[in-house]
Image (cartoon, rainbow, N blue to C red):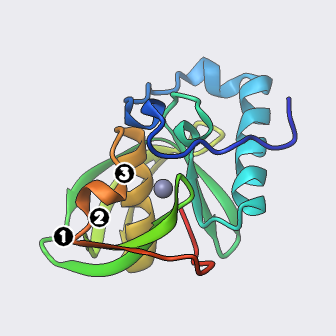
């Protein structure tokens, strides 16, 4: 497998597709585990804080997020509940170069997912982490942040992208 993948950009129609859940046997496959590694390398080399597999053209329900401890993979992530409270903050996307925009997102979400070993995860994400996960899980459903943005502007600055 390649050492890193290329990131597809808007308006590539692949970004509008829905991804498919990963099966337990697929997750256990060595080739798939190698793909997860390449996905996190791709995110790091792009200086991203998150990356969904669909952004590399793979229609599987996988996202990787840069945590304090390093990249963490979320397999088949689903948001079970959202806080009523929302906050508007700037976002940028590796698949939508050159712009940034403000998006109102729930400040707290409850998430169900599998880790890369297939262990079930159930956790509450807050603030910035909640925002990155909502951005990534939108990708898995063919949604881009520019669909939700209140305001979009040209931004050549090297902002953290997801
Ligand atoms: Zn993105």
| Residue located at (57% from left, 58% from top) | 94
Residue denoted by label 2: 109
In x, y percent, where is residue 115? 58, 45
Question: For the point 28% across and 76% down, which residue is it?
Answer: 107
Q: Is mark 2 within 8 Å of ligand 1?
A: no
Task: Tell me the SS state at disc 1.
Answer: loop
- Mark 3 residue's CB less than 8 Å from ligand 1: yes
Q: Secondary structure at mark 2?
A: strand
Question: Left or right: where does residue 60 sit relative to residue 73?
Answer: left
Instruction: Note whether 119 is above or below 18 in the view shown.
Output: below
Q: Is residue 45 left or right of residue 112?
A: right
> Which residue is under mark 1?
83
Total labels: the figure holds 3
The residue positioned 51% from the left and 28% from the top of the image is 59
Residue located beneath label 3 in the image: 144
Give SS at disc 3.
Answer: loop
The front one of 143 and 35 is 143
Asked if disc 3 and disc 1 are in contact, CB closer than 8 Å, the reply is no
């Amino acid at each position: 497998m390649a050492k890193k993948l290329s990131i597809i950009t808007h308006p590539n129609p692949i970004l509008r597709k829905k991804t498919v859940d990963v099966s337990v046997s697929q997750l256990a496959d060595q080739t798939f585990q190698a793909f997860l590694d390449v996905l996190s390398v791709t995110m790091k080399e792009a200086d991203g804080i998150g990356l969904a597999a669909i952004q590399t053209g793979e229609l599987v329900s996988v996202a990787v997020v840069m945590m304090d401890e390093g990249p963490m993979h979320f397999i088949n992530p689903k948001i079970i509940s959202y806080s009523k409270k929302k906050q508007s903050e700037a976002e940028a996307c590796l698949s939508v170069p050159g712009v940034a925009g403000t998006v109102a997102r729930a400040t707290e979400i409850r998430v169900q997912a599998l880790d890369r070993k297939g262990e079930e995860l159930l956790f509450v994400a807050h603030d910035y982490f909640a925002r990155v996960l909502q951005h990534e899980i939108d990708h898995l459903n063919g949604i881009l942040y520019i669909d939700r943005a209140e305001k979009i502007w040209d931004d050549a600055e090297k902002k953290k992208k997801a």
